[in-house]
Amino acid sequence: EAGVAQSPRYKIIEKRQSVAFWCNPISGHATLYWYQQILGQGPKLLIQFQNNGVVDDSQLPKDRFSAERLKGVDSTLKIQPAKLEDSAVYLCASRYQRGYNEQFFGPGTRLTVL
Amino acid sequence: AQTVTQSQPEMSVQEAETVTLSCTYDTSESDYYLFWYKQPPSRQMILVIRQEAYKQQNATENRFSVNFQKAAKSFSLKISDSQLGDAAMYFCAYRRGTDSNYQLIWGAGTKLIIKP
């Protein structure tokens, strides 16, 4: 079974530029999460999707961050414009919707904002 | 709101010895799940072990076991016979929500160093 795929793995941009991350969850996983993991901290949930609907985006800085999950499969997370404090690893995770099921994580995208 | 605290930023252990990582949490719920995740350098997060709060028996997975103290809101991870491959960041996490819709609340992590 293929795991959660993310791209790119690394990205370096200047502040005020835009960047987009892509995530392809495990086939059949209806629930998808985007996390921000700043160095030395645990992951912080940015947004949770169930199929193509948003379940929770209360911690997403909506003035600069946006995310979508068209067709309920893969998802993109965008930052526009980026700030220095956005430097972090962005993790995508997915799981089956029903019953308890663990979250499976992708390798993450390491973003550096200069 | 639930919180998870890992008070040990870094721990080191000699290969083949035993190490215990600490985690405390705060919640007003009576039924919940707790997890330990491992994040090796530049590799993805993987689940190590989970504990259901309603179960009194401590969870065990091979060399990994937990000491779950519900009243004290403590959830430590014991790694026996440490191996070089155990070197990683370890995160404690609390599950908030139901089976069909849940989120994880994470601690800050403990970096585990294995000395050969």
Image: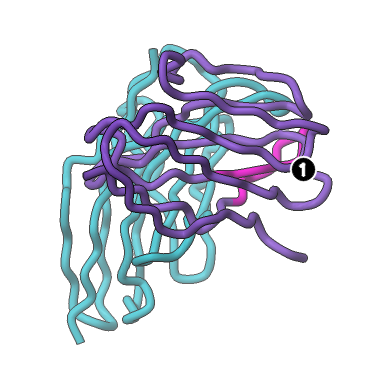
Chain colours: A purple, B cyan
Q: Quadrant of residue A52?
A: top right
**Residue at coordinates 53% horizontally, 36% vertically from top-left?**
A34
What chain does badge 1 belong to? A
* Relative horizontal placement of residue B14, taking residue B58 as reference (left or right): left
SS class of the residue under badge 1?
loop
Question: Where is residue B6 shown, x and y percent of the image?
Answer: 24, 40
Nearest the eye: B89 or B6: B89
Which amino acid type corresponds to the residue marked 1 in the rendered image? His
**Residue at coordinates 19% horizontally, 72% vertically from top-left?**
B13
**Residue at coordinates 31% horizontally, 35% vertically from top-left?**
A86
Mark 1 lies on residue: A29
Q: Is the magenta stretch mostly helix, strand or loop?
A: loop
Question: Where is residue B92 shown, x and y percent of the image?
Answer: 38, 43
Looking at the rendering, the stretch of residues picked out in magenta corresponds to A92-104
Nearest the eye: A25 or A99: A25
A18 part of magenta stretch: no
Question: Where is residue B69 shown, x and y percent of the image?
Answer: 37, 36
Quadrant assignment for the N terminus of chain B: top left
